[in-house]
Amino acid sequence: MNNISGLILFMNIIEEQINNAAKLLVKSRFAVCLTGAGISAESGIPTFRGKNGLWRKFKVEDLATPEAFNRNPKLVWEWYRWRMKLIFNAKPNPAHYALVDLENMEILKCIVTQNVDGLHTIAGSKCIVELHGNIRRARCINCNYKLIFEKPPEKIPPKCPKCNSLLRPDVVWFGEPIPSEALNMAFKMFSKADLALVIGTSGIVYPAAYLPYLVKENNGVIIEININRSALTRIADIYLQGKAGEILPKIVNLIRRKNY
Ligand code: NAD
Ligand code: ZN
C-alpha cells in the first residue's frame, strides 16, 4: 500500500468511527460528557500540558497551589491575571456549540468540565458541573465573600470589599479537594450514564479522570475525542483522534441528517 492509499484508508476508518459514535449517541439513554482544557484549545486558551504549558519559567504545579499563594500571592495573581486576559478575550468554538446542540436534541444530559473558563456557559449549555471552579470568580480567604469579575483585576492582589483580606481565584488548586456539591453532582450524573463523551482531557487529574470508569463499570460506552492518546484511551470503546472543534460538529451533522 502506498502512502496515499494508506491515508485514504485511515480517513475512511475515522469517518466510519464518527458514524458509529453518532449512532451510539442516538441510541443512548443517558449520555454525559467530561471536558478538559483541550476543548478550549481551539478558542485560543493554552492547555496545561501542551507545548505552551509554561508561563515565564514556572511550572503550573508551582503556581496553582495554596503554598504558592501563601508564599507569593502577587506572583500567583499575575499568572491568573494573564490567564484571565486570555479567557476574557476567548469565545466558545464549534466544539462547545456542538455540545449545546446535543443537549437541545435531548441526547446529552450533562457536561462535567475541568475547565475554569466558563465557555460552556457562554455557548449556552444548561447542565454544567464545574469541577475546578471558575476563573471569572474570586473568593475571600477570610470571610468567603465571592466576587465576579467583569474584566481582569487591575490592582493585584485584589482585596475583599467586605473585610479587606486577600481575595484568591475561586478555582481548585493542586492538592485541594473539589467542592462537595460539584463532586456529588458529577458522580451522580456519571453513575446514571450509559455513554460518556470524553473530550480534550489528559485524564491524569483525579477525581475527574475517575468519572469515565463509573460508566465503564456499568457497561456503558466511552467515546473519546483527543488529538493525542490520553490516559483514558485504553478504556475508550471509540477513540476519535482529532480536534474536538472539527469532530463534534461532524457528529451533530450526521445525527441531524440521518434517521438512525
Ligand atoms: P491537559 O492540559 O492536561 O490536557 C489537555 C488535553 O487536550 C491533552 O490530552 C491534549 O492532547 C488534548 N487536546 C489539545 N487540543 C485539543 C483539541 N483541539 N481537541 C481535542 N483534544 C485536544 O488538560 P486537563 O486534562 O483538562 O487537565 C488540566 C487541568 O488544568 C484541569 O484541571 C483544568 O482545571 C485546568 N485547565 C483549564 C483550562 C481552561 O479552563 N480552559 C486550561 C488549562 C488548564
Ligand atoms: Zn472578606
Image (cartoon, rainbow, N blue to C red):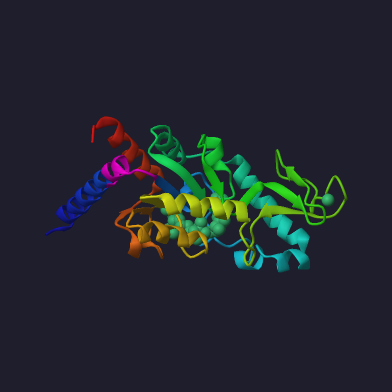
Q: Point out the image quarter for the C terminus.
A: top left
Vertical side of 87 occupied by 48: above or below: below
Residue sitting at the far left: 1
Examine the structure image and report whether residue 25 is included in the region drawn in magenta.
yes
Residue farthest right in this picture: 163
| Residue at the image point whose x is 55% and y is 47% from the top | 129
Image point (36%, 50%), residue name: 195
In the image, residue 122 lies in the stretch drawn in magenta:
no
Residue 253 percent across, percent down from the top left: 31, 34
Does residue 44 lie above or below 123 as drawn? below
Query: Going by the image, does 238 lie left or right of 149?
Result: left
Query: Horizontal and vertical percent for residue 239?
Result: 31, 56
- Locate the N terminus and report the quarter of the image it occupies: bottom left
Q: Residue at x 50, y 37 (%)?
A: 125
Image label count: 0
Does residue 37 appear in this view?
no
Query: Taking 130 as reference, is 166 left or right?
Result: right
User: At 41% from the left edge and 43% from the top edge, which residue is drawn?
Assistant: 245
Q: Position of residue 240 (x, y in %)?
A: 32, 52
| Residue extent of the magenta highlight | 21-30
Q: Quadrant of residue 252?
A: top left
Relative image position of residue 77 (x, y in whole percent): 73, 56
The front one of 29 and 91 is 29
The majority secondary structure of the magenta stretch comes to helix
Q: Is residue 218 visible?
A: yes
- On screen, 246 above or below 1? above
